[in-house]
Image (cartoon, rainbow, N blue to C red):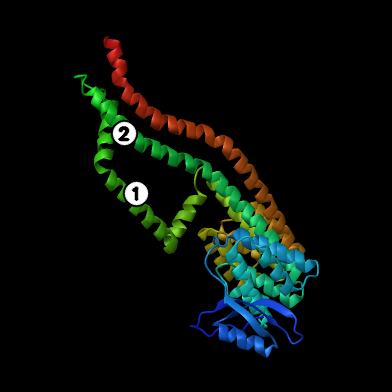
Amino acid sequence: MATATAVKGIKDYIFEWEGKDRNGKIVRGEQRAGGEAAVTASLRRQGVLVTKIRKRRTSGGRSISAKDIAIFTRQLATMMKAGVPLLQAFDIVARGSANPRMTRLLTEIRSEVETGTSLSAAFRRHPKYFDTLYCNLVEAGEAGGILEELLSRLAIYQEKTLAIKQKVKSALMYPTAVLVVAFIVVVVIMLFVVPAFESVFSSFGAQLPTPTLMVIAMSKFFVNYWWAMLLVLGGGGYMFVQTWRRSEHMQLVMDRFMLNMPIFGDLVRKSVIARWTRTLSTMFAAGVPLVEALDSVGGTSGNVVYAKATEQIQRDVAAGGGLTLSMNAAGVFPSMVLQMAGIGEESGALDDMLGRAAEFYEEEVDEIVKGLSSLMEPIIIVFLGTIIGGIVVAMYLPIFKLGQVV
């Protein structure tokens, strides 16, 4: 039970209450309101005499992730298919969630639905967790009376999208971790190891080899200006990340660079195409008109290059052009996707053909990730050997020469 949405500017809270109904039976529940008085008044109108009431704590719990939303969608779809009423399904999922923040979110949505708000409208009030695609599909399911079916489609879509993202992250994690470790090792060598060798070499009284002098000069720079390097790297990294987030031009440049990177570019491109085709297939299968579906597809691709191409495709389709011709004009889709889309348009099975294209590219991403593991190992070994091994050899050259003299 809940009150209507609060007036703008008044903060709502979740209250847990206990009381007795008209028959004297003890009842419990949760309600969203601006204060205890509002909860008590609302329940009194419903014939409930409140005996206990307290505001739920809003702190604690980790942030809500995309995985939490995917699990919720799968659970809600399963229970609705089993005939569990919507509000009861929300109760079950909320109580079963291990994340307190997710429990609070679902309780709020349940309260909004209970007061007469449609499920899609309740989701739209939480855009941080439920994007336009999610809300549009839920709205289409409510309008067509097939909510459980579209929730199941949403769950499949989210699970496959999360799997793709996880595979890309796992492929990039290994080289990133190695680069970070290599950087730390080089810094330790420059700050502590090389100065110790320099004090030993100073007693030789002989001219040191050029590679050794170069490493010692680099070490002195590290020792004297480590604070400046830390400031430049930290400040520069922060400014770069902020610019990347806020500047559309920077996002376009970086996303284009990621698509054309050696080794990893093919992985990024195929994962983006898999998400793009999977999203459009899911939207179109739900009965969402093509132009409206394209409105949600670009943003979910995760790449500004494809988002801008999708905007152009949407304009062309809205003007009466065919989807395949518009995709071909965008110049970012491989011939296989274009052929599948063309067959889908001609046969009236666009959602099925795009779904097959998505499955193909999802399998391609799997194969690339498997191949990258074996490909990156020798490259990383050569990289580490060149950097760290070069420093070590440079520091031991004077000792080798001294041994030859003796």
Query: Which amino acid type corresponds to the residue marked 1 in the rendered image?
Result: Leu
The reply, left or right, for residue 165 in relation to residue 190 is right
Which residue in the rendered view is the most extreme toward the bottom? 45
Image location of residue 344, percent across then percent down: 73, 61
Tell me the crowding category of disc 2: few under 14, some 14 to 19, or many 20 or more residues within 10 angstroms, Cα based. few
The answer to which quarter of the image holds residue 383 is: top left
Front residue of 55/209: it is 55
Mark number, residue 233:
1
Asked where in the image residue 135 lies, by quadrant, the reply is bottom right
Which is nearer the N-term, disc 2 or disc 1? 2
Q: Where is residue 242 in the image (x, y as percent from the top left)?
A: 40, 60
Q: Name the residue under label 2.
A: 192
Q: Residue 281 carries which label?
A: none
Residue type, label 2: Phe
Instruction: Give the camera-side residue of 78 and 53.
Output: 53
| As drawn, 121 above or below 234 | below
Q: Regarding mark 1 in the picture, which secondary structure is present there? A: helix
| Residue 254 in the image: above or below residue 291 | above
Nearer mark to the viewer, of 2 and 1: 2
Q: Is mark 2 on a helix, strand or loop?
A: helix
Nearer-the-camera pick, 227 or 55: 55
